Image (cartoon, rainbow, N blue to C red):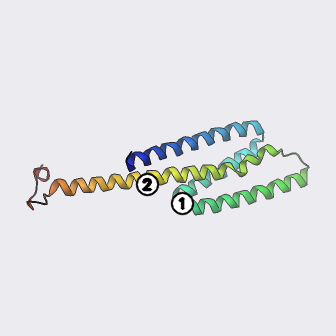
Amino acid sequence: MNDSQKASLQADIYLLLFLGLLTLTAILMTASGHLLLNTIYIGLTVVSILITYFWGIIPGLVENLLFIFAQIVVMVYLNLAQGPQIPLTLTFWLIVPLGLSFFVYQMTAEQRQLQWQNQRLRSNLIEQGAFDEQTKLRTMVAMV
């Protein structure tokens, strides 16, 4: 198996893991039953995924840590102010955004590698197809 096939397979695997974790998140959101908190958390998770996609893993992880800290503060406040009404089933939000961000980062890293290999192959094809190294003459491909 060459490098491009390996990178393509790994990108597919990370995409499937991302979709699987997203499906698990939807199931857990339904099971917990707190519509407002789940809506806020899924919105912040999407922001975290976008940060990871555009700026890389380090800013994504920093945002995830801030998100976890904010969740802890909100849960402590709600449980102290209103009594223990928030169930522990919402604790999956401490782990899910990290996993989603990680899978998106890995998937895009493999896709970037495939794009780089594709660009390199295209430039090599243009260079080798337009100029013959042995005769130092242009080939028929360059004339067409």
Taking the image as shown, residue 29 lies to the left or right of residue 53, namely: right
Q: If the image is split into quadrants, where does the N terminus sit?
A: top left
Taking the image as shown, residue 141 lies to the left or right of residue 92, namely: left
Count numbered badges in the picture: 2
As shown in the figure, which amino acid type bears the numbered disc 2?
A: Arg
Q: Which residue is mark 1?
A: 56
Q: Residue furthest right?
A: 83
Question: Would you call the spot at circle 1 few (<14 residues within 10 Å), some (14-19), or many (20 or more)?
Answer: some
Q: Tell me the residue at 57%/49% (across/down).
A: 103
SS at mark 1?
loop
Q: Tell me the residue at 38%/52% (across/down).
A: 115
Q: Tell me the residue at 42%/54% (across/down).
A: 113
Q: Which residue is mark 2?
A: 112
> What x and y, as percent, mark residue 35?
75, 41
Taking the image as shown, residue 125 lies to the left or right of residue 31, namely: left
Q: Earlier in the sequence, mark 1 or mark 2?
A: 1
Taking the image as shown, residue 117 lies to the left or right of residue 77, namely: left
